[in-house]
Amino acid sequence: MADTALTAPLRSPLSHVAGRLAAATRTSGGAIRLAELPFLAQLDVRLDAKGTAAEAVGLALGLQLPLQPNTVVRAGELTALWLGPDEWLVVGPPGGEREVESRIREAAGDEPVSVTDVSAQRTTLLVTGPRAHDLLAHGCSLDLHPRVFGSGRCAQTTLGRTQVVLVARDEPRAGFWVLVRSSFAGYLTDWLLDAATEYV
């Protein structure tokens, strides 16, 4: 019987515009940097934040799930984003989704927990540089000033009329992650590239 397994290499939603993103970065003279971070592991986790599973899952992942709205907790290669009172998005390195899911389920034991691998649902754009705030402010109604939306903050919002999860990274000058559904990634990238022409 013939082997019917898919052997084609993975192709990210924005692989066809990598050159344009790099060109915009170069021509901005360092004002902005745009790049795709493809294939990050992304797991939607739902459980009772006040139950025993929350603490156990936090210990298993090496980070406590954030309980304050719109905050981010990062430890090692994992980042947990608060999406709701009983919902988080756990982001990890490419290919790590099965291992992270297994750790969550094992830690939760018999406690009710929902873990959904949504890695293929979104891709991630990295937006950094001294003018990153200004670029994103063109199409986002949130106040992105660092005093309001500083390191360790996240929000489900719209950017250029596209639903995204926006994350202010917690390292100095690390900029933002923009998590966008794969089907809208091309449109949003075109929007960002167009808005970035101001800095060329």
Image (tube, grey):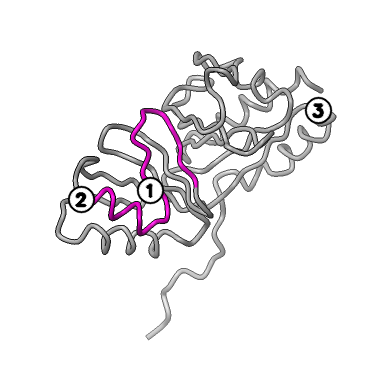
Q: Mark 3–mark 2 contact, CB under 8 Å?
A: no
Disc 2 is placed on an element classified as helix
Q: Position of residue 60 (x, y in %)?
A: 35, 59
**Magenta stretch contains residue 65:** yes
Give the magenta range. Answer: 53-74
Disc with the residue nearer the chain's start (3 vs 2): 3
Q: Position of residue 90 (x, y in %)?
A: 41, 47
Label 2, label 1: how far apart the Cα atoms are:
25 Å
Q: Is residue 90 left or right of residue 55?
A: right
Residue 52 is labelled as: 2
- Dot 1 lies on which element? loop
Quadrant housing residue 83:
top left
| Mark 2 closeness class: few <14, some 14–19, many ≥20 residues within 10 Å | some
Q: Amino acid at mark 3?
A: Ser
Between disc 3 and disc 2, the foreground one is 2
Q: Are marks 2 and 1 in contact (CB under 8 Å)?
A: no
Q: Residues within 10 Å of mark 3 (few under 14, many from 20)?
A: some
Q: Quarter of the image containing the N terminus?
A: bottom left
Q: Is residue 102 left or right of residue 127?
A: left
Residue highlighted by disc 1:
118
Picture quadrant where residue 28 is located:
top right
Q: CA distance from mark 3 to mark 1?
A: 33 Å
Give the CA separation, mark 3 to mark 2. Answer: 49 Å
Residue 169 rendering spot, x and y as whole percentages = 57, 36
Q: Residue type at mark 2: give it.
A: Thr
Q: Residues within 10 Å of mark 1 (few under 14, many from 20)?
A: some
Give me the residue at 68% from left, 22% from top.
194
- Residue 130's mark? none
Q: Is residue 173 magenta?
A: no
Identify the residue position indicated by label 3 in the image: 28
Residue drawn at x 64%, y 21% is 133
Give the foreground label among 2 and 1.
2
